[in-house]
Amino acid sequence: MQPEHGFQPITWNDFARVELRVGRIVAAEPFPQARKPAYKLRVDFGAELGMRQSSAQITALYQPKDLVGRLVVAVLNFPPKQIGPFMSECLVTGFDDAAGHVSLCVPDHDVPLGTRLL
């Protein structure tokens, strides 16, 4: 059977292994040492999961002051990744717009921090 649109099929168990969780950005600052324009983010995933930091290439559509307080969806179970002098501990998700700028993937209603996407 040929995969539709070139997607490689995965099983439900494959998807269930990805820890996509909701967090709230509590700090955002420029990351001048990054090769591509990025911000350093601190994201709160609630009492059980705690704080994580992430490097996010979202500078075209967002200013640091406008990010603080926003909910985001992030992958928490990738291994930490060294990005220059910074250790990224989660992957904040987003979609490229028509111009190739990243628009954050966010819940459209308030949900508890740490809530898992199912």
Image: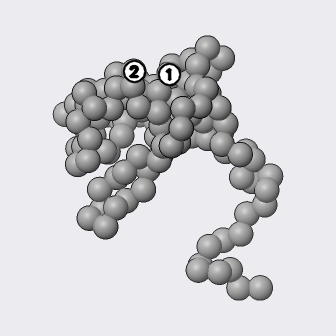
**Can residue 7 be seen in the rendering of this structure?**
yes
How dense is the environment of label 2, judged by Cα within 10 Å: few (below 14), some, or many (20 and up)? some
**Which x, y percent locates residue 20?**
61, 41
Residue 54 falls in which quadrant of the image?
Answer: top left
Residue plotted at (59% across, 79% down):
6
Task: Please report contact status of discs 2 and 1: CB closer than 8 Å, yes or no.
Answer: yes
Left or right? Give the position of 55 relative to 8: left
Height in image: 36 above or below 24? Answer: below
**Which is more N-terminal, label 1 or label 2?**
2
Q: Closest to the observer: 99 or 53?
A: 99
Under tag 2, what secondary structure?
A: strand
What residue do we see at 61% from left, 26% from top? 112
Q: Residue at x 47, y 37 (%)?
A: 72
For badge 1, the amino acid type reads Asp
Residue for badge 2:
26
User: For residue 57, what is the image quadrant?
Assistant: top left
Horizontal side, residue 61 vs residue 76: left or right: left
Give the percent coordinates (x, y) of residue 56.
36, 40
| Above-or-below relation of 18 to 55 | below
Residue 44 tag number: 1
Q: Circle 1 sits in a helix, a strand or a loop, which is it?
A: strand
Q: Is residue 99 positioned above or below 86 on the image?
A: below
Taking the view exactly as shown, the residue that stands out farthest to the left is 32
Q: Quadrant of the N terminus?
A: bottom right
- The residue lying furthest to the bottom in this view is 1
Instruction: Work out whether residue 80 can be spotted.
Output: no
Disc sitting over residue 87 in the figure: none
Q: Is residue 100 left or right of residue 44?
A: left
Q: Which residue is most to the top?
A: 47
For the point 65% across and 81% down, the residue is: 4
Q: Which three-letter amino acid code belongs to the residue tagged 2?
A: Val
